[in-house]
Every structure is written in C-alpha cells, then in structure tokens.
Amino acid sequence: MDNSDSNNSKCRIIVDAMGGDFAPQNAVLGAVQALKENNFFELYLVGKEDEIKKVLKDNEAQFDDKFIINASQVIGMGDTPTTAIKAKPDSSIVVGAKLVKEKKADAFVSAGNTGAMMAASTLIMGRLPGVGRPTMGSLMPTSQGKCSIFDAGASVDSKPQHLLEYAIMGSIFMKEIHGIENPKIGILSVGEEDSKGNAVTQEAFRLLKKTNLNFVGNIEGGDILKGTVNVVICDGFVGNIVLKFGEGVLTFLKDKFKAYAGQGLVNKLKIGLVQGAMREILKDFDYQEHGGVPLLGVNGISIIGHGRSSQKAVKNMVLRAKEMYDKELVQKIQDSLSNYSNIS
C-alpha cells in the first residue's frame, strides 16, 4: 500500500483474507461482493497473495492486484492470541492492524481468531483516550425495536468504570448506526430494584445515574428479548454467554422444524406453508445478516466476524465498517467519552 493513500479521503477497508474457517474463499469473495454493492470505498485484501489470487481466478472475480497486500503468516483459530501476535509479525491480522495504526487504512475486518483480532486491535491500533477496556457489541432480536449487548466478550470481567464506558460507547453506536435517537440503557442484573446486583453493577448503577444518558436502571434477562432497553450493559463473561445462547436458538429452532417435518407428509406440508414467514422471522437471529460485531473503544474501526462466516456475512461486515466510517463513529465516541471524563 502506497503511503500516499493516507491522504485519500475515501474510506479504506482492510479485509483479512485468511480469517475464518472457510478462508480465503469466503473472505475474498464476500469482500468483493461488498465492493460490487457499494464501490465508494477502497478495498484491500491482506493475506497470502498466491492463495488470494487463486480464489479470484478460480471464481472469475475482478479485483485489481495492486489492492492485494501480501502477508506470509496466518494466526490459526487454535493459536494463543497475544503469543501469536508476537510470534507471527507478518500474519494477516498483525499486518492489517498495523495499517490502521499507521493511518494507511480506516477499518479492519476479520473472521479469524477472535482473541488475536481483539488483542491486535487493542495493542497495535491502540485505545481511544479515556477507554479502560474496549467493548464488543452484539445485536439481539427483540419483540420491539433493536437491542445490543455490551460487552459481548471482549473482557471476561469489568470494573464499574468500564461498564460506564460500555454504556457511553453503546449509546453512540445505537444512535448513529441504528438510528435510535435516545437509546434506553439498562444494567443486566438479578432484579430490577436499584439495590440488586453485585458490587460492580451497584457501583456502575451509581455512576450511570450521574450521566445524562437515558439510563433506566437494572433489567433482568427476560427483558432483553422484550426490547425493554436498546443497550444492555454487563461484563463480557455474562454477555458472551447470553450471545452464544442467542446464537444457539436459531440452530435449535431449525432442528425442531426439520424434525417436525420429518414426521410425515402432513407435517411437511404444514411447514412448507409457513416456511417463507419463518425464514423472515428467524432472520433476526441470523448472525450473517449483521456480519460481525464491532470492537468499540479502539483507535480505528475493527469488525470481528464469526469463524464460520459465509460470504454474505463477510460482505455485511465490510458494509458495516463502511457505515461506521461514514458516520464518523470513532470520533463521536471519543468526543462523548471526553464529556463524561470527570464522573467518579
């Protein structure tokens, strides 16, 4: 990548071509699909150049070779994140994160090793001023409106101040990306009463009450799907469990419908009659529709995808990165954090 690109006003998105269980096939073709749908950005593919070119050639996909960045190493799904970052400096994840750090790119997208992607984004790209810990947000379907959980697994434990940061960043994300003007925020706890929760959530409750955010108090697990709030705040240990449970719901329902249809012709006909409606309803549970989850609080745009990401999921990850760039999300998060820097 030429250094002159750093002065280009067009969004520059790096895609980890080696990231994911089905890389480079899905990563490369999904990224190219995104470019076909929206060509108002520059797309760079980072990874093993010969493998990237083979995928492009085999699938007759048009892509300029000058936008391929060679990286000779790959961080595997089983690699230890921080160790791998040091041991594999020419890996696609490390190279991609460095390009954002050096302002040669604006966003980095990967469906590779989640821990390595989080570590590279945090340690190489760096944190925004005022961020103790970055947070991942995951969209959850609700009976009304939209809801995201922060943190969805970036940190397994958090201090009260971190939960406050999650609320600030999550509120900005839901407003700018999902168009919710004044997002409702709730702390996930074991009861709705103000006094419920452990020491961390109780202190976070006190801090959030000092802000002018739309904080409604504690919520219970059942409130998530009800859509009681738009931003659910919790530590990553709890949030990741909720996220993985939600992902499992789709597989469970699909298996139940398949088993029901397999019980006979009449059941199969019943399922056939409502198949279209079910597909639309269950789409809200499908991670492919949302692509990946944003890592907020780092100095750049970082989108982390599911290891099983399809071409569609990768495409949507890239388009989400472009949307975050267009909405100037990183700058708005930084500005909002500075407004609450004195809360203690």
Image (cartoon, grey):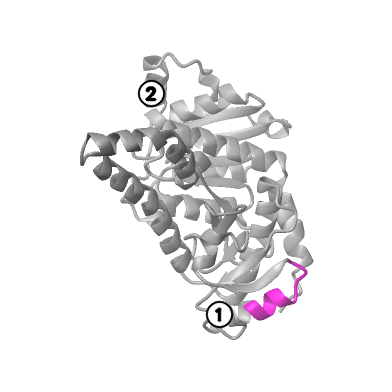
Cα distance in 3D space between marks 1 and 2: 50 Å
Q: Which residue is located at x 75 percent, y 53 percent?
A: 181
Callout 2: helix, strand or loop?
helix
Tell me where residue 218 sits by quadrant.
Answer: bottom right
Circle 2 packing at 10 Å, graded few (<14), some (14-19), many (20+), is few
Q: Which residue is mark 1?
A: 200
Query: Does the magenta-highlighted stretch encompass residue 10?
Result: no
Q: Is residue 122 above or below residue 97?
A: below
Q: Is residue 131 visible?
A: no
Residue in front for this viewpoint, 83 or 259: 259
Give the magenta part as a residue range. 205-213
Tell me where residue 334 sits by quadrant.
Answer: bottom right
* Nearer mark to the viewer, of 1 and 2: 1
Residue 222 is situated, as x and y percent measured from the top left of the image, at 49, 67
Type of residue at label 2?
Asp
Q: Which residue is mark 2?
A: 50
Tally the marks. 2
Q: Quadrant of the N terminus?
A: top right
Residue furthest out toward the front? 266
Instruction: Specify whether 242 is left or right of 293.
Output: left
Residue 324 is situated, as x and y percent measured from the top left of the image, at 65, 43
Residue 174 is situated, as x and y percent measured from the top left of the image, at 66, 53
Callout 1: helix, strand or loop?
helix
Q: Which residue is located at x 49 percent, y 60 percent?
A: 154
Residue 30 is situated, as x and y percent measured from the top left of the image, at 47, 29
